[in-house]
Image (tube, helix red, strand yellow):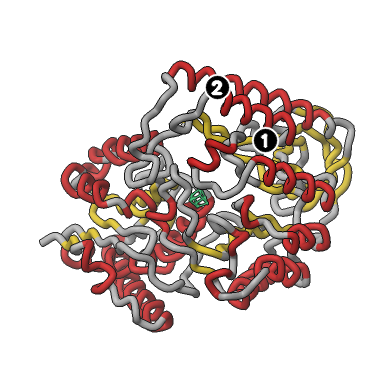
Amino acid sequence: MENVRDRKNESVSCGQDDGILARSMESADWMEQVRNLNTEHVLKTGKVRTYRLDVFGCQMNERDAETIAGMLTNMGYERVSPDQPADIIVFVTCCVRENAEERIYSHIGALSHECLKNGSFIVASGCMMQQPHVTEKIKKSFRHVKVVFGTHNIHEFPRLLCQYLTSGKRVLEVWEKEGRIIEDMPIKRRCRHKAWVNIVFGCNNFCAYCIVPYVRGRERSRKKEDVLAEIRALAADGCREVTLLGQNVNSYGNDLGVKDLFARLLYDIEEIDGIDRVRFTTSHPKDLSDSLIRAMKECKKVCEHLHLPFQAGSNRVLERMNRKYTREHYLDLVDRIRDAVPDIALTTDIIVGFPGETEEDFEDTLDLVRRVRFDSAFTFIYSPRKGTLAEKWEQTAPHEVISRRFKRLVEVQTEIATQLASKYEGKTVEVLVDGPSKTNPDMQSGRTRTGKLVNFRAEGDLTGQMLDVKIIRAGAFWLEGREVKRRG
Ligand code: SF4
């Protein structure tokens, strides 16, 4: 029998009133049961069971993947690289754009032969699974997907996995609504010197194009003490840079009834020995307060980089998008931020071709890009998402027109990014080394405080070290330099 919960009853039957401790202890019990099964398997076969992860989408998903990896490690599984066969293949899915969804279906479909041949199976999780039409499709069309859970019941993964392993029957459970925040889940982080730290989950903003509030639920902030305890533990373990995560970090604490909690959190992190750099993402322009700008100026560990999505430069489009700010507000905000932190690098997200966007609206977007001069921008062509406000809004511009606008935007932004990057040439910058470059194994790569990617030649493994690097060449998306001094 397949275990697909009636979605209507999900929030009732999932025990939303259980205590946090009770639920995390429950996860620990299920993990122990799976661990015992895996120990038996090792004794019988001499082989350790393995997993691999296929992660799509944003940093939230990357961070969720670290929790899933933590649980699997705790349960006795060993991670293998993406090109190796594994007993479990975990997908952390994204539904923010249509092409990501299509890619995920095609990746899952392509694995049916491998699963059949090796006796392995797929676990599907993440934002896509929060949508009923997706779980229905998975259930009907992808028999090699044996376990499904969503963003709200990630902590239930050990129970669902245990149920599948002991019964052999597929287990598909997705909570319709978010529960309370579960602390103390195991985490296996992608690296030691840098870490993502969740501070707020979900979003209350309902931008007309965005699926996130429907699949990640309403805003829930972690307690400041819990965030600080996690960062202190990270620092004790050698972490030097933390990135605070939330769909809208600027509203951190609003649901706890505490004003300006995000700014206060930054001041508290400033006091933690061992942490050298603090970043955060994402900031909503309507909620970026003066106290936060002051904290960015006064906290020396807060990096000179701000990702501030503006999405569209026309007030008419911004209103239709339900963004709740104007281009004038955005430009004023940029001025105030630059007054406080003059060398700050600004990056942004821009959507082209939102339903109803006219040539004049698009010119407003280009104008804003030229005025602000962003160091880089994530540019997207609008793609309607099922269940959002804008889903059924008519597209007024033909596809060729939107493509042409998109191309122009990319050209303008690339030119600006190249000009801004050229200012680094000849300068010496602080770089936190991430390890060998992904594109050239003879080079090391790392990031400046402003978030720029730097490649440079160096002997040995310098991962996690802070260096001074002199920039000798600059492109729109990367800098090339040579090491001049090791800071430690
Ligand atoms: S602020 Fe808007 S774009 Fe960002 S996650 Fe929330 S609804 Fe989506």
Which of the image's four quarters has the C terminus? bottom right
Percent position (x, y) of residue 477? 68, 31
Quadrant of res 347: top right
Kindly tell me whether residue 446 is visible in this rendering: no
Question: Is 401 drawn above or below residue 31 in the view shown?
Answer: above
Q: Is residue 61 left or right of residue 45?
A: right
Q: SS class of the residue under badge 2? A: helix
Q: Is mark 2 within 8 Å of ligand 1?
A: no
User: What label sits on residue 175 in the rendered view?
Assistant: none
Percent position (x, y) of residue 390? 39, 40
Q: In this view, which residue lies farthest toward the front?
A: 316
Q: Which residue is mark 1?
A: 376
Label whose residue precedes the other's in the sequence (1 or 2): 2
Query: Label 1 sits on what residue type?
Result: Ser
Indicate which label's residue lies in the foreground, 1 or 2: 2
Percent position (x, y) of residue 375? 72, 36
Q: Residue placed at 83% from the left, 34% from the top? A: 424
Question: Is 229 drawn above or below residue 248 in the view shown?
Answer: below
Other-residue count near label 2 (Cα within 10 Å), few / some / many at <14 / 14–19 / ≥20: some
Q: Is residue 466 left or right of residue 205?
A: right
Q: Residue placed at 41% from the left, 34% from the top? A: 383
Quadrant of res 191: bottom right
Percent position (x, y) of residue 275? 74, 64
Which of the image's four quarters has the N terminus? bottom left
Other-residue count near label 1 (Cα within 10 Å), few / some / many at <14 / 14–19 / ≥20: many
Q: Which residue is mark 2?
A: 359
How many labels sit on residues? 2
Q: Residue placed at 73% from the left, 36% from the top? A: 372
Query: Label 2 sits on what residue type?
Result: Glu
Kindly tell me whether residue 94 is visible in this rendering: yes
- What separation in Å lies between label 1 and label 2 (alpha carbons)? 23 Å
